[in-house]
Amino acid sequence: MKASDSGLGLIRSQEGLRLEAYPDGKTPDGAQRYSIGYGHSGAHLGQRISMVEAERLFREDVQSFLYRRLC
């Protein structure tokens, strides 16, 4: 399955883009969780990425989500 360009645009508009890691909730053990780009989890404090990297992570995250939904 593949997301359409309009679907990807909608997700981008809802997520927003941040090129520097930002706090995004806590892990189950209470540690700070960080995200980056278009909501990509697993970043670390102070991490920065380029627009190209944000797009790559976004597309990988969408593909991973779609794959999990189909299995």
Image (cartoon, grey):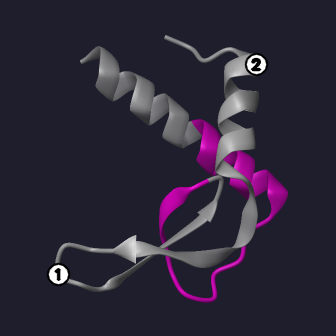
Q: Residue 39: image x %, image y %?
A: 57, 55
Relative horizontal placement of residue 23, taking residue 17 as reference (left or right): left
The picture quadrant where one finds residue 13 is: top right
Label 1 residue SS: loop
State the residue at coordinates (63%, 81%): 47
Q: Residue furthest left?
A: 29
Q: Eyeballing the image, is 21 above or below 55?
A: below
Magenta stretch encompasses residue 53: yes
The magenta span reads 39-59
Q: Residue 59: image x %, image y %?
A: 62, 37
Of pointers 1 and 2, the one earlier in the residue sequence: 2
Which image quarter holds the C terminus?
A: top left
Q: Label 1: which residue?
A: 29
Label 2 residue SS: helix
Q: Eyeballing the image, is 55 above or below 35?
A: above
Mark 1 to mark 2 CA distance (whole Å): 37 Å
State the residue at coordinates (75%, 69%): 19
